[in-house]
Image (tube, grey):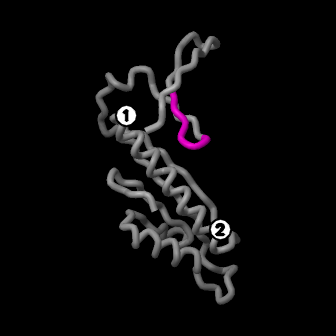
Amino acid sequence: MQEWQEENNSEHGNQQRYFYLGNVQVFIADDYEHQEESEEDIQEDVHQIDLHQMPYVEAMELVRKQVNVLVELKQDYIALGKRNKVQLIIITGRGRHSNRSLPVLQTNVKTLLQTHKMSYVIDSQTKGGQITVTIQDDTHMI
């Protein structure tokens, strides 16, 4: 877990607690320890990457890096007692720009997710051009 930091926000007259996850600053509510969470209290933390027209190697590396960042974020939320829903939307496209108009990125992203037993859904409205990954409590880095 990342180390807590505090700063005085003189503009609003309060103190804010936060930690850094990579270069992302994550703020924590002052009274998070005292909140009882209901289904309405679960926050959705949705991230998106667009792999359109990226070379295969770079695209797959970006997927791995982003999944790993979000797995670490989910683990930090768990350590803080939060039940945030963490998702990654991966826009792969449908393969219309590939050599044989086959969905190379989509196929390989699905294989990567299946290999690591990750939960995902393919958006039928985009005809398979978008995959939504849900980072579960027990999801491991890839």
Amino acid type assigned to the residue bearing label 2 in the image: Glu
Q: Which residue is mark 2?
A: 58
Give the residue number, with chain letter if any, for mark 1.
80
Is 19 magenta? The answer is: yes
Mark toward the start of the polypeptide (2 vs 1):
2
Q: Nearer the viewer, residue 36 or 135?
A: 135
- Percent x, y for residue 78? 35, 41
Q: Is residue 38 above or below residue 113?
A: above
Relative depth, front residue between 130 and 67:
67
Q: Position of residue 123 (x, y in %)?
A: 49, 67
Q: Give above or below for 138 relative to 52.
A: above
Above or below, 70 against 96 in this view is above
Q: Which residues are magenta?
A: 18-23
Tell whether 66 sits left or right of 116: right
**Could you tell whether 105 is left or right of 2 in the image?**
right
**Distance between mark 2 and mark 1 Cα atoms:** 33 Å
Does residue 48 belong to the magenta stretch? no
- Where is residue 62 shown, x and y percent of the image? 60, 62
